[in-house]
Amino acid sequence: MKTEKNREKITFFIMTGILLMTALISLAFILMKGSESGRTTVIISEGKVIGRYDLDLMEGEKRITVQPEGSRGFNEILISKEGVCITDSDCKGKDCIKTGTISHFGETIACLPNRLIITITSDDEYSGYDARTY
Amino acid sequence: MDKKTVKTAYIGLLSALSLGIYALESLIPPVLPIPGIKPGLSNIITLYALRKPGKKEAALILTVRILLSGLLFGNVLSVLYSFAGGYAALFTELICDFLLKRKHLYLTGAFGGLFHNLFQLIAAFFLMGSAYVFSYMPYLAISGIITGLFTGLAAHYLLKVRIPSHPL
């Protein structure tokens, strides 16, 4: 009887531990921000890289409208030295616009309905992909 | 009334309740601009159903809720996301409830929330074709655990309530 109660306690602590660890590791990832040079923004539409821009080499602002062939959905992207944001979209939730401007490594804007992802990586990442400038 | 009729009616009632909660929840404006962060209140019904009518009925209620909500408010994509998350949560909660010997329902709920979000991200990975969706994982993990704790506690107190002439 006693061992069974102990076993229950152990299960409880292990499971609480797993949850706490997951939460702490996640928090560490959120708070971690790397250096700020060589930031490259990669725009991925429907699983394909459609544009790469080095943020630190950007001069002025650049506006891009992404609308895949045969799709009604569009997103307007604004790229500048300060970062990348989506300024307009026809999606329902507008989560992509509400995300605001991203400028740090690893930050991502996603528009799930339009299958668009914008992220910031370092230069050497993603070089294996067949990327072309929009 | 025979038992089967009562059970069918009861499953219907819980499914309707789950759908109603889901619809109400979608009216709550998002707190953070990250796709996938929401209270997940219909998890209360899933946890409740897991204990009261049973696991088969819980799966049935979940399926009905997902299909109807997709039909009423969503599209094929949202149904796929819901299926990935909903069933991941259900199976996780089944295993956790077994491991914890039907105690500490809030822990079960937290695990359910965590795996719901994890599997929705995996679904997003396949649908979007990009691993970058996983950069949302830290945010979704924390939100899943917090909302799961809350819905687990809610289900725990709901199960304590004695409903007069409860059929099961």
Image (cartoon, rainbow, N blue to C red):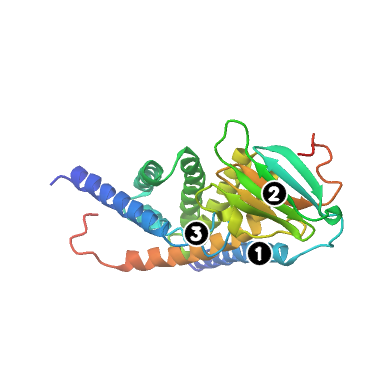
A1 and A45: which is toward the camera: A45
**Side of A32 relative to B156 (left or right):** right
Secondary structure, mark 3, is loop
Q: Residue at x 36, y 68 (%)?
A: B157
Dots 2, 3 in contact, CB < 8 A: no
The total of numbered circles placed on residues is 3
Dots 2, 1 in contact, CB < 8 A: no
Q: Residue at x 85, y 49 (%)?
A: A123
**Side of A93 relative to A43 (left or right):** left
Q: Nearer the viewer, mark 3 or mark 1?
A: 3
Residue A11 visible (yes or no): no
Quarter where residue A85 is shown = bottom right
Q: Earlier in the sequence, mark 2 or mark 1?
A: 1
Q: CA distance from mark 3 to mark 1?
A: 22 Å
Q: Residue at x 81, y 62 (%)?
A: A34
Above/below status of B139 relative to A2: above
Residue B38 image label = 3
Above/below status of A3 relative to A70: below
The residue wearing badge 2 is: A118
Secondary structure, mark 1, is helix
B138 and B104: which is toward the camera: B138
Residue B32 place in picture, x, y as percent? 56, 63
Disc 2 residue type (three-letter): Ile
Do badges 2 and 1 share one subunit?
yes
Do badges 3 and 1 share one subunit?
no
Q: Nearer the viewer, mark 2 or mark 3?
A: 2
Quarter where residue B44 is shown = bottom left
The residue wearing badge 1 is: A21
Disc 1 residue type (three-letter): Met
**Side of A99 relative to B60 (left or right):** right
**Label 2 crowd bin: few (<14), some (14–19), many (20+), radius 10 Å:** many
Residue A100 place in picture, x, y as percent? 64, 60
